[in-house]
Amino acid sequence: MDGFDLELLNRLPLAEATWTLFRYAANDEVLEQVFEQNRGRAYRSKLTFSTLVDLVSDALLVHQGSGRRSFADGRERGCLTITDQAAYGKLRRIPVAVSEALLLEVGARLRAVVAPMQSRALPECFEDFQVVTIDGKKLKKLAKRLKPLRGVSGSLLGGKVLVGIDSRSGLAIAMSSALDGEANDAPLVPALVSQVRERVAGLRLWLADRQFCDLSIPWLLSQDGDGFVIRHCLKMKFHQDPSREVREFRDSKGRTITEQWGWIGSAKDKRRMYIRRITLERPGDEPVIVVTNLLDEKRYPAEAILDLYGERWHIERVFQQVTEVFQLQALIGSSPQAAILQASLCFLLYNVIHVIRGYVAQANQISPEMVSPELLFRDVQKQMTCWTELGTTSLPERVCETPTEDNATRRRLIELLRGVWSDRWRKSPPKKNWKPTDRTQSVPGGHSSAWKLLEQARSEALQAPGVRK
């Protein structure tokens, strides 16, 4: 590297950390192996899978989700030798199995270098379990470029993915997918569970919402000694065990908790299962009712199970960040296959920023929860764009020379991010919840001037009794 490139790279530690992680977890060898093992009838062409992943990743990281700008930049750098139409065609035909394997394989490598302090604390009684949260996400706003889709009114769904999140590290583990965006989540569960069990050793504890409460899914999740905590869907009948006494007590906030034991499923059904049902009464809101196969109330207290179920909402925040921060709200390709590949890359990008956030927090001895992923990602984008515009090579030589072993990658991340901090990365404190007024005020024409409404409210306040004029 010449003096200019070296000095420029020294000023871009976030960008170098991102490249280092990508080169360790998603280098050409790993990507081509993923493609070869899962490509089916797809074939190699002038545009390799590793190059396609690099181009789409650059679109998400550097070009604000624009595939065309990324392809143009790739053509200038010499890594794209085909037309944009051919590149979009390759993206459109990527097999779903390749996209699923991409998140599974690369995600496993990223989890191997997570900062130790990044592990989130869960109730101690669940230390023997690897806690996995599952939920589905629709891929919205597919581009209407293909001829059969032109002229169709409304938004198009570009497929559906069911994702598993490691509740301790916060990283996405695996996903299963359907090309039909209106598909139900339940049929995707077996494929996801199989992938997670392949990569996550030991006992697993599954967290899921009420759409997964049927007879088949709890039976599947309880295999291999695993546990589950699922919100009870009232359509699923519960048959109380008359030999067990119903327990009722209050939690630390004075709310009533009820514990029952019994069966889900009829006596003739082979999937019938003995479970424990826990109900938390919430004044002014619907109760939270969960079912679990963790039957021992002393080893797994009801309050701990309810607290653990509360962690399920973390996956909703992950989906929000992946959509709004990591460019999943604007789909690059024009087919469900392309949308699913972009979803896989967006979850990997979320994982990368999540890992970097952990090392930044560790270097500054603060909690990772205090670092905003969105604000950190913005600076990552700025630094990578800076290198793209000013650097003389597509990837710095120093990054290419960094060893790709686990320990070497950890050491390099610690070196790069030691002392790197900006107060603008600090997450804002939670805002006070406000509720809209119950009064509905109709306005002529369906719209009005905000200034007029504010002046009207001010005038009414001045005319109120007891107000000094």
Image: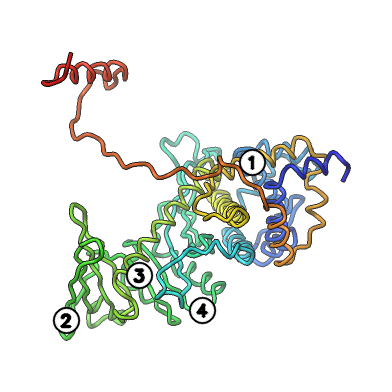
Amino acid at circle 2: Glu
Give how far apart the Cα atoms at labels 1 and 3 are: 38 Å
Which of pointers 1 and 2 lies earlier in the amino acid sequence? Answer: 2
Q: Decide: few, some or many residues near mark 2? Use Cα within 10 Å; few <14, some 14-19, many ≥20.
A: few
Residue 265 in picture, x, y percent from top left: 25, 76
- Can you say whether 238 is above or below 60 in the image? below
Secondary structure at numbered mark 1: helix
Q: What residue is shown with label 2?
A: 245
Circle on res. 202:
4
Ranked by sequence position, the earlier of labels 4 and 3 is 4
Q: Which mark identifies residue 305?
A: none
- For the residues labelled 4 and 1, the Cα–Cα distance comes to 37 Å
Q: Quadrant of residue 35?
A: bottom right
Pointer 2 and pointer 4: residues touching (CB < 8 Å)? no
* N-term mark: 4 or 1: 4
Residue that lies at the very extreme toward the front in this rendered image: 468
Left or right, residue 207 beside residue 448:
right
| Residue indicated by mark 3 | 229
Mark 1 and mark 2 residues within 8 Å of each other at the beta carbon = no
Look at the numbered disc 2 and give the secondary structure of its residue: loop
Q: Is residue 249 left or right of residue 140?
A: left
Closer to the eye: label 3 or 2 = 2
Q: Earlier in the sequence, mark 3 or mark 2?
A: 3
Quick one: SS at disc 4?
loop
**Residue visible at 51% across and 60% down?**
170
